[in-house]
Image (cartoon, rainbow, N blue to C red):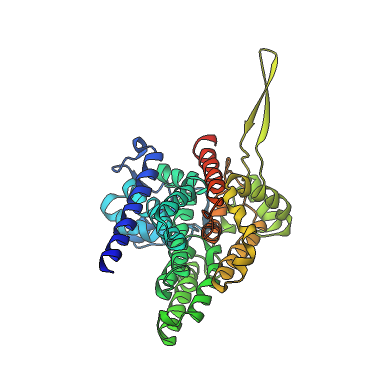
Amino acid sequence: MLEDSRSAIQKSWLGVAVVCLVVIGLLKPSLIEPEHVFGARNNNQIAEAQAWWNGQLDIPDRKWDTARVGTRIYNHFPPLFTFIAAMVVPIFGGVPQAVVLTMVVLPIPALAFLLFKWIIGRSGAALFLAIGFVCGTSLWPVLDQALRGASPYPVNHALATIGLLILLGEVFGKRRIWVAGAGLVMATMARQLTVFYAIPLLIIARSNEAAGSTRSRTLAIVVTGALVLGVPAVLNSLKFGNPFDSGYMRVYEDRTDALAEAARAHGLFSPHFVPGNLYHMNLGLPRVHRIEVAGEPEYHIRPNRICTGIWWTTPVLMWLFWDLRRTLSDPARRGVLMACALVFVCLLFFHGAGQEQRGFNRFSLDFLPGLMALVAPRCFEGRRAWISGAMIGWSMIYFRWLI
């Protein structure tokens, strides 16, 4: 038994190493410059971390997507990356690319492999699905952008994905409430809508007596809830004078672009945005561009710049509908599906769910990890293995080479 356990651990570490090496290779190692340091101009959260070390909350310069209160300028993004940046800016004057690589990018393939291995039970299938998840979904351009420029948008999506993978690993694994709670805290402090994943957390906390005494589980939920709600509320109060004011609308006060106009006219969330988001998030097909060359028309396919549908770019998710009855029969799986559905619905009403995403949909990462975990159990059973392999192969070609 000890040898079997040791062999399983060795295979897990080997799988983690392989999937991380594959991702590094596809990210073009020539672009990885560990000595490169990202500064305040790359990410408002780095500027905020530097401000904290100077004993203040406001940042010195008005940048894109910053919130102004009187004469003070604030970062409005969730605080997780600010906390990470604050740990290293006194040493490096910013955030080295090596930190982004090791703390933002590489944990995702490693955690994805461990999650899928736990669900599927076979290292080979888990390895293939983990590579497909990282390289065959909108996660790929997000990680590429995070590593290239440390922009707050891809960085926060990547950090939220790490938190969700930790939480899902417990929902489908040992169901340790404290670990799952830490995953939820991490996810919500990078992407607020992931708070809906509290649903499967509460389900496993209620149903899993092996996770500890009732008092221990209750304490874990209380501490998780206090951090999820309390930390942003305190920061909002200190910056904007209201625990419920994230400063989001303030970023549009001096802007005249279409996104700012839409938010001012209809609000951050509105039924007005549902038809467009419904199309772009589900279909978002490429556009055919016509040009004249030597008097002859030529037609070129260009990826949609306003979000792209998940079902044809990551078709392996279609197994979700095939296995829907099985998913609904299990309380924990049902909770994950409910969380994904609520996130999806909220994004349909969001004013900016389809902005400046050439050929991909970064907002899908708020629900896509949960969907991938739901389709994983039977993804490589029998004849499905060949179909799933073809689906994942297409997705990897699309995200790696076609956009």
Q: How many marks?
A: 0
The residue sitting at the front extreme is 382
Q: Residue at x 73, y 59 (%)?
A: 271
Q: 79 above or below 19?
A: below
Q: Is residue 259 visible?
A: yes
Q: Position of residue 255 (x, y in %)?
A: 60, 48
**Location of residue 23 (image quadrant):** top left
Q: Is residue 62 visible?
A: no
User: For this view, does 291 lie left or right of residue 50?
Assistant: right
User: For this view, does 38 lie left or right of residue 341?
Assistant: left
The residue sitting at the top extreme is 294
**Location of residue 9 (image quadrant):** bottom left
Q: 199 above or below 124?
A: below
Front residue (pair 90, 14): 14
Q: Which quadrant is home to the N terminus?
A: bottom left
Q: Residue at x 56, y 67 (%)?
A: 336
Q: Position of residue 321 (x, y in %)?
A: 65, 58
Q: Position of residue 312 (x, y in %)?
A: 62, 45
Q: 183 above or below 102?
A: below
Front residue (pair 88, 24): 24
Q: Position of residue 326 (x, y in %)?
A: 60, 66
**Location of residue 403 (image quadrant):** top right
Q: Residue at x 30, y 64 (%)?
A: 4
